[in-house]
């Protein structure tokens, strides 16, 4: 390789000055592990010359897709299906009677109390007549666009492992998340933003932390990029140099790209180097694109009101949902939103859906937040013609028991059954799949795992989940492991 003679003046810059300016131009080193770069084969060719990043399908699909992008809404803590989406009339009749199971009354975190009906009334909504609880008065308007899976199960009753399974298909950490698999397979539709964006709750990271958007054994460039949504913090830390006068022009960038590529060419097996180089290159583009993408000042007053941005409780999640719309509008492939954080808050209300002590208090608080944000997001996407090409799905890691937790006012963990829902991107609205048993204790008809949810989402993106693989430690790995089927009943 030769350096273009137009850039030969670079070598005349004093060594100390050059190093200072190279460092200032791209922020702190921490940015390297935060920002994945471009993923598509075309972008890789353009930036890397003969080097090609690992992109499974090189922009091509296995079949015609109905969705181009994904917005995943994750409600950590374990949302109670019997108080939200899953109407169980028999549970109302069993209310107040003793729970009697073949395994006794010992549960995950305590002892089973008496059966308890939903703390919110269920009503039918939409042309499909879908039953939803009064916890979600706004979302009930969208049931004709939504498909519900009422037979979801998990293999763990622990928050971290259960969340890993819902995001990666494995209860152990270290496996690639769904967002990483999607961007590995399809790349990104934009050169100036990350392909996989993560919007954590303002209260902190979810259970399991960054393992929920980890790239695992896939090239590190496919990990999620955290965008800070709190209004008092910059969206991306250290994106801009501390010295605003730093001069880092195109010639210096070209020279830095050259020496970085030379360094990586000598170490082809280290994907972390490729990810770091890509992150620095993307950082330069983000200095121009990120402020526009996360800036909400040009959004209309009606949009601000729709997402309730001024509300102290709802506003932060509304901002996450609005940013998700703006990102997919600009070509981001996968956006992951967390409605809740790890159990670290000192406040009486839990910082997520984990309602052991008082389900009316905790679900009542979070229900209003989720209801407003999702209603705004689905309405906004639909009005802009984006819902048809954007798959929105909402899940939690497990459900909650149909009985009280001892003498407390809450419900314990229940990995035996819970509900997830999907909308847009080729989903047949007003439908459902699978059922829980009569009281919502465990899955009864068509038991479903993350494998099936992931296989269905990949199918909508034009990917055959059995053919999207990565060779690792002698095994052709895939998101759905050796399981999974496409749930065609909701397509």
Image: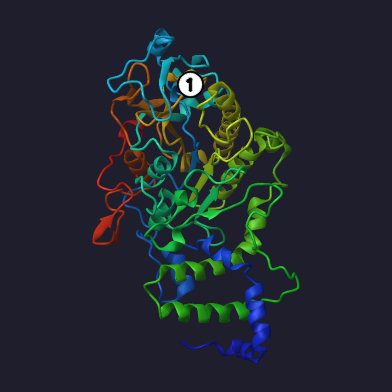
Quadrant holding the C terminus: top left
Locate residue 130: give its quadrant. Answer: top left
The 10 Å Cα crowd at callout 1, few under 14, some 14 to 19, many 20 or more, is many
- Counting every numbered tag in the picture gives 1
Q: Residue at x 69, y 37 (%)?
A: 309
Up-down: is 477 above or below 131?
below
Any part of residue 131 in sight = yes
Any part of residue 402 in sight = no
Colour convention of the picture: rainbow
Q: State the image coordinates of residue 304 (x, y, percent, origin top left).
A: 69, 38
Judging from the image, what secondary structure is the residue with disc 1 in? helix
Q: Residue at x 57, y 49 (%)?
A: 327
Locate residue 85: give its quadrant. Answer: top left
Up-down: is 319 above or below 35?
above
- Taking depth in this image into account, of 216 and 299 the one nearest to the observer is 216
Quadrant holding the N terminus: bottom left
Q: State the image coordinates of residue 359 (x, y, percent, origin top left).
A: 53, 23
Q: Which residue is the extreme one toward the right? A: 245
Q: Residue at x 27, y 62 (%)?
A: 473
- Taking depth in this image into account, of 289 and 265 the one nearest to the observer is 265
Up-down: is 183 above or below 372?
below
Up-down: is 107 above or below 125?
below
Q: State the image coordinates of residue 293 (x, y, percent, origin top left).
A: 63, 53
Q: State the image coordinates of residue 392 (x, y, percent, origin top left).
A: 48, 39
Label 1, on which residue? 83
- Taking depth in this image into account, of 411 and 309 the one nearest to the observer is 411
Left or right for 69, reference 244: left
């Amino acid at each position: 390789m030769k350096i273009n003679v137009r850039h030969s003046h670079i070598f005349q810059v004093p060594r100390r000055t050059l190093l200072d300016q190279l460092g200032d131009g791209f922020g702190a080193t921490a940015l390297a592990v935060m920002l994945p770069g471009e993923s598509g084969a075309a972008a890789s060719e353009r930036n890397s010359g003969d080097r090609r990043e690992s992109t499974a399908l090189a922009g091509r699909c296995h079949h015609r897709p109905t969705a181009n992008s994904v917005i995943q809404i994750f409600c950590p803590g374990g949302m109670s299906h019997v108080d939200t989406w899953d109407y169980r009339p028999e549970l109302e009749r069993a209310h107040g009677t003793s729970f009697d199971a073949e395994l006794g009354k010992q549960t995950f975190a305590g002892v089973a109390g008496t059966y308890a009906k939903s703390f919110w009334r269920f009503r039918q909504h939409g042309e499909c007549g879908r039953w939803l609880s009064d916890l979600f008065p706004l979302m009930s308007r969208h049931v004709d666009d939504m498909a519900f899976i009422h037979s979801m199960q998990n293999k763990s009753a622990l928050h971290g492992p259960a969340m890993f399974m819902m995001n990666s298909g494995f209860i152990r950490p270290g496996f690639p998340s769904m967002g990483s698999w999607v961007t590995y397979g399809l790349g990104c539709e934009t050169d100036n933003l990350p392909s996989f964006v993560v919007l954590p709750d303002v209260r902190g990271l979810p259970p399991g932390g960054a393992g929920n958007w980890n790239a695992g054994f896939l090239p590190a460039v496919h990990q999620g990029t955290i965008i800070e949504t709190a209004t008092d913090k910059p969206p991306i830390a250290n994106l801009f140099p501390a010295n605003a006068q730093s001069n880092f022009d195109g010639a210096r960038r070209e020279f830095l790209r050259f020496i970085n590529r030379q360094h990586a060419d000598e170490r082809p097996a280290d994907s972390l180097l490729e990810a770091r180089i890509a992150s620095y290159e993307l950082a330069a583009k983000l200095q121009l694109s990120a402020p526009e993408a996360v800036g909400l000042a040009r959004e209309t007053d009606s949009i601000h009101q729709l997402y309730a941005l001024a509300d102290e409780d709802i506003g932060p999640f509304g901002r996450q949902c609005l940013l998700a719309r703006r990102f997919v509008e600009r070509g981001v492939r996968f956006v992951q939103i967390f409605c809740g954080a790890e159990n670290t808050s000192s406040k009486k209300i839990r910082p997520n859906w984990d309602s052991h002590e008082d389900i009316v208090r905790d679900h009542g608080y979070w229900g209003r937040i989720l209801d407003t944000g999702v209603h705004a997001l689905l309405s906004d996407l639909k009005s802009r013609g984006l819902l048809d090409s954007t798959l929105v799905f909402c899940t939690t890691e497990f459900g909650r028991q149909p009985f009280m937790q001892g003498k407390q006012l809450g419900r314990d963990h229940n990995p035996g059954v819970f509900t997830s829902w999907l909308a847009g991107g080729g989903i047949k609205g007003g439908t459902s799949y699978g059922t829980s048993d009569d009281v919502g204790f465990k899955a009864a008809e068509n038991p479903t795992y993350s494998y099936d949810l992931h296989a269905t989402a990949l199918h909508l993106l034009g990917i055959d989940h059995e053919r999207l693989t990565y060779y690792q430690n002698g095994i052709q790995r895939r998101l759905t492991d050796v399981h999974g089927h496409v749930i065609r009943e909701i397509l």
